[in-house]
Image: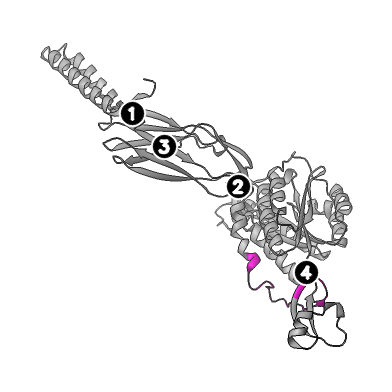
């Protein structure tokens, strides 16, 4: 009986019978009629109950989950529902989704015909990395007369890990295979060398290295032929994630740090597809999550695992400690992509000596975020004095962001000022542009 639920029509019937019994005190003739209504109602209710509860497993359902969730993206969750009754039923589906989604009124309503199987899909968008626990899948099946409902419970206790956005990573995957690898009007420089990047077989001329003679081609052509190679164009790239207090600012429910992590993963995939070496590190009070640069095929999985485990202690970031760690761990010239955030020119000035020191030995790109809410405030139509003040303050902060870009450029430091939505594509384009020029 614990799976039996009475629907509103039953309580309406109880109310009508109650009123009839009260009226029978005034009109005695109604007393017999009321008991007749009670008898008919009981028979109808019993018939409806037996139709729904006779037999076992007349309704079956299964929840289909992906192997993992992609942070910040829409992830599909499938439910397969089968009706083995000889009549149509209406189903209320209540899936106990993880508490992180804060969805307290989740409900799917579906009409399933006799002996029919339906597959339903709903979307969830996680905002945090970590473990997401799905609870019970509850199906409330209504009887043909809509008097009673029976509860079925399926798929208890399923856990899914939520990783940095691999959906976004795949979205930008094709960039690595673009035909125009040197975009932005930059010229490809052809350098002749003797490394392992083969280009072509050509006739021997005076001055060619005799060690590159291709004897098979020489025998075939009956003249000396040599292998020609291009200079190896493998560069080293490091993504540096600031996981301090300022990176916990929320945007559309997700912190700036999580946007930076998703962008870092997408960039790492493109860098590896370009045969460059990619490494990473994260810092706040101290430098952690260090992954040495490599271009092995298995290296991306190591980066994904490291990004998944990044956590913050909400402390102030120590750029001096970052400089010391970079100097110790990255000994040759590399491209450093630093994900951080500066809200004012004064906050940049405190860290500028360390950024200038990093830029002396490496190509440094500082990536920080545009405050979209302030930008929207400056574009809003002004209607009163208070809005004028808000507009002036917002314009001041936006102007300081542009000043930060100018200040960084003054010292030869590249910068990207972008919105969280455009972070990945802006970062990838900047990497491709710098790679085309050469580090």
Whether residue 50 sits left or right of residue 122 in the image: it is left
Residue 26 is left or right of residue 307, and the answer is left
Q: Is residue 388 visible?
A: no
Chain-order first, disc 1 or disc 3 = 3
Q: Are marks 2 and 1 in contact (CB under 8 Å)?
A: no
Question: Nearer the N terminus, badge 2 or badge 4?
Answer: 2
Residue 147 position within the rendered picture, expressed as x and y whole percent measured from the top left: 28, 27
Q: CA distance from mark 2 to mark 4?
A: 33 Å
The residue that label 2 is drawn on is: 71
Q: Are marks 2 and 4 in contact (CB under 8 Å)?
A: no
Specify few, some or many for label 2: CA neighbours under 10 Å numbering under 14, 14-19, or 20 or more: many
Q: Is residue 380 visible?
A: yes
The single residue placed furthest to the left in the displayed view is 29
Residue 233 - label: 4
Q: Which disc is residue 149 wearing?
A: 1
Which residue does the image show at 88% across and 85% down from the upper left? Answer: 207
Q: Answer with left or right where residue 294 lies relative to residue 59.
A: right
User: Residue farthest to the front?
Assistant: 219
Q: Is residue 433 above or below residue 137?
A: below
Q: Nearer the viewer, residue 57 or 428?
A: 57
User: Which residue is the site of mark 3?
Assistant: 61
User: Under tag 4, what secondary structure?
Assistant: loop
Q: Which of the two discs, 1 and 4, labels the residue nearer the N terminus?
A: 1
Q: Which mark is residue 78?
A: none
Whether 223 is among the magenta residues is no
Q: Position of residue 288 (x, y in %)?
A: 79, 44
Q: Earlier in the sequence, mark 3 or mark 2?
A: 3
Q: Residue at x 80, y 78 (%)?
A: 191
Stretch of the chain drawn in magenta: 175-198
């Amino acid at each position: 009986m614990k799976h039996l639920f009475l629907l509103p029509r039953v309580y309406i019937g109880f109310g009508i019978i109650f009123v009839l019994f009260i009226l029978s005190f005034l009109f005695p003739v109604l007393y017999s009629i009321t008991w007749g209504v009670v008898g008919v109602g009981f028979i109808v209710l019993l018939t409806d109950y037996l139709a729904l509860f006779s037999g076992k497993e007349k309704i079956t359902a299964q929840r289909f989950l992906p192997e993992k969730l992609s942070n910040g993206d829409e992830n599909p969750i499938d439910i397969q529902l089968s009706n083995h009754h000889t009549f149509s039923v209406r189903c209320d589906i209540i899936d106990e989704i993880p508490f992180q989604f804060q969805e307290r009124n989740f409900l799917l309503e579906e009409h399933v015909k006799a002996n029919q199987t339906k597959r339903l899909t709903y979307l969830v968008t996680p905002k945090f990395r970590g473990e997401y626990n799905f609870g019970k899948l509850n199906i409330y099946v209504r009887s043909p007369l809509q008097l009673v409902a029976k509860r079925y419970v399926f798929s208890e206790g399923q856990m899914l890990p939520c990783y940095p956005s691999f959906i976004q990573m795949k979205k930008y995957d094709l960039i690595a295979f673009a035909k125009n690898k040197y975009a932005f009007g930059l010229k490809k420089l052809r350098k002749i060398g003797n490394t392992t990047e083969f280009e072509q077989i050509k006739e021997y001329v005076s001055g060619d290295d005799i060690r590159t003679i291709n004897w098979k081609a020489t025998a075939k052509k009956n003249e000396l032929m040599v292998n020609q190679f291009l200079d190896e164009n493998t560069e080293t790239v490091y993504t540096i994630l600031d996981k301090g207090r300022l990176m916990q600012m929320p945007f559309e429910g997700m912190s700036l740090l999580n946007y930076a992590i998703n962008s870092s993963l997408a960039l790492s995939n493109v860098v590896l597809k370009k045969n460059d070496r990619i490494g990473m590190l994260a810092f706040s009070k101290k430098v952690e999550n260090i992954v040495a640069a490599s271009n092995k095929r298995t290296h991306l999985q190591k980066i994904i695992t490291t990004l998944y485990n990044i956590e913050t202690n909400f402390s102030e970031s120590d750029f001096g400690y970052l400089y010391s760690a970079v100097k110790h761990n990255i000994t040759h010239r590399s491209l450093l992509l630093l994900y951080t955030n500066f809200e004012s020119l004064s906050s940049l000035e405190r860290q500028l000596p360390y950024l200038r020191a990093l830029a002396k030995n490496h190509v440094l790109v500082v990536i920080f975020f545009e405050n979209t809410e302030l930008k929207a405030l400056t574009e809003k139509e002004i209607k009163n004095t208070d809005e004028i003040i808000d507009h002036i303050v917002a314009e001041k902060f936006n102007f300081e962001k542009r000043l930060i870009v100018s200040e960084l450029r003054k010292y030869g430091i590249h910068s990207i000022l972008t919105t969280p939505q455009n972070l990945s594509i802006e970062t990838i384009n900047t990497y491709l542009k710098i790679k085309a020029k050469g580090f």
